[in-house]
Image (cartoon, rainbow, N blue to C red):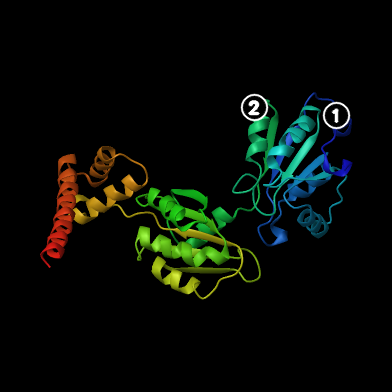
């Protein structure tokens, strides 16, 4: 169908009216809830675009109606399922002079949403790229969380499978920056329980639900309490903000904690030697002290195992 393909190079050049040899890719932020949060430039870009690539064309239609915008550009779908196949078509349109506007369902394109492939392809072709800054669930949740905001890292969605999810959490168990995640409401209780297991039940967090919408809610507390709350059922768009790992000096880390930290790093794929060196650096201790703690724990486990075996043999 012609309505679902990008315009040819010659058509794009004619429609852009710029006379330049190449067009421009515009990444536009859209409201995460309240439509009145839409940046004023969004309406102008929607009207000026030769091609509008939308994650959901139906949501785009509702957005333009709410903003009172009339679009003349060709509208194409651009979502996870067709992102790879459609990217070359959009690049071709850009090379032909088109102004291509990329919008997702909510927030900024590329942030846990379609867009990265198109941006990377445009960069490779040395095409012009600009952005219309807009609402962000990541920054909004971070600001509302009440947790430190001076340094943070965005981790996106965790894996759906329990084992893979635990593995990803263990990778950042000692991360001191505030962590921000997206999560589906039906997996929230399992995710919070996994966080409590890996990060510690007392680690502070905030669950931000339906941001800027009618039923906006921010639930703050220790991970254990939040997991129990979420087990009752939660609805809506979810962003989870988790406090970073506390800084710990040598006096605060006993042998068991040193061994645990080494094990976390080993489970994340580090070799034991590197894991010991890293934990020693974090704790401000000699590597030998951490090594001795690991060896002692290993010997204790072996002794307990041997004792159990001897007991069975004797019986």
Residue 121 vs residue 297, the one in the foreground: 297
Q: Is residue 149 left or right of residue 97?
A: left
Numbered mark located on residue 13 in the image: 1
Residue 199 appears at what percent x and percent y?
A: 36, 58
Residue 23 appears at what percent x and percent y?
A: 77, 30
Quadrant into which the C terminus falls: bottom left
Residue 251 in view here: no
Residue 110 appears at what percent x and percent y?
A: 62, 44
Q: Residue furthest left?
A: 314
Q: Residues within 10 Å of mark 1 (few under 14, many from 20)?
A: many
Residue 26 vs residue 91, the one in the foreground: 91
Residue placed under numbered mark 2 in the picture: 124
Q: Is residue 27 left or right of residue 283?
A: right
**Regarding mark 1 in the picture, which secondary structure is present there?**
helix
Residue 5 in view here: yes
Do callouts 2 and 1 mark residues in contact (Cβ within 8 Å)? Answer: no
Residue drawn where x is 51% and y is 55% of the image:
181
**Regarding mark 2 in the picture, which secondary structure is present there?**
helix
Residue 98 image-quadrant placement: top right
Numbered mark located on residue 164 in the image: none
Q: Is residue 13 left or right of residue 180?
A: right
Sequence order check: which comes first, mark 2 or mark 1? 1
Quadrant into which the N terminus falls: top right
């Amino acid at each position: 169908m012609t309505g679902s393909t990008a315009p040819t190079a010659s058509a794009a050049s004619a429609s852009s009216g710029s006379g330049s040899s190449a067009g421009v890719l515009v990444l536009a932020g859209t409201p995460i809830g309240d439509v009145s949060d839409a940046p004023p430039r969004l309406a102008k870009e929607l009207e000026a675009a030769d091609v509008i690539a939308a994650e959901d064309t139906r949501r785009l239609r509702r957005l333009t109606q709410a903003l009172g915008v009339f679009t003349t550009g060709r509208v194409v779908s651009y979502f996870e399922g067709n992102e790879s196949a459609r990217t070359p078509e959009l690049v071709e349109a850009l090379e032909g002079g088109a102004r291509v506007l990329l919008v997702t369902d909510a927030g900024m394109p590329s942030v846990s949403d379609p867009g990265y492939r198109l941006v990377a392809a445009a960069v490779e072709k040395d095409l012009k790229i600009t952005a219309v800054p807009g609402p962000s669930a990541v920054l909004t949740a971070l600001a509302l969380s009440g947790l430190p905001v001076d340094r943070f890292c965005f981790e996106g969605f965790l894996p759906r499978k329990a084992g893979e999810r635990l593995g990803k959490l263990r990778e950042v168990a000692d991360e001191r920056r505030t962590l921000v995640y997206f999560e589906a409401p039906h997996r929230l209780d399992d995710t919070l329980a996994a966080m409590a297991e890996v990060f510690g039940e007392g680690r502070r967090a905030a669950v931000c639900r339906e941001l800027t919408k009618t039923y906006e809610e921010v639930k703050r507390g220790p991970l254990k309490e939040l997991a129990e709350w979420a087990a009752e059922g939660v609805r809506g768009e979810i962003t989870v903000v988790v406090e970073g790992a506390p800084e710990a000096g040598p006096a605060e880390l006993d042998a068991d904690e040193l061994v645990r930290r080494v094990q976390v790093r080993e489970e994340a794929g580090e070799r034991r030697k590197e894991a010991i060196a890293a934990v020693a650096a974090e704790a401000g201790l000699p590597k030998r002290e951490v090594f001795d703690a690991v060896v002692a724990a290993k010997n204790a486990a072996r002794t307990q195992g041997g004792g159990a075996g001897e007991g069975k043999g004797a019986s």
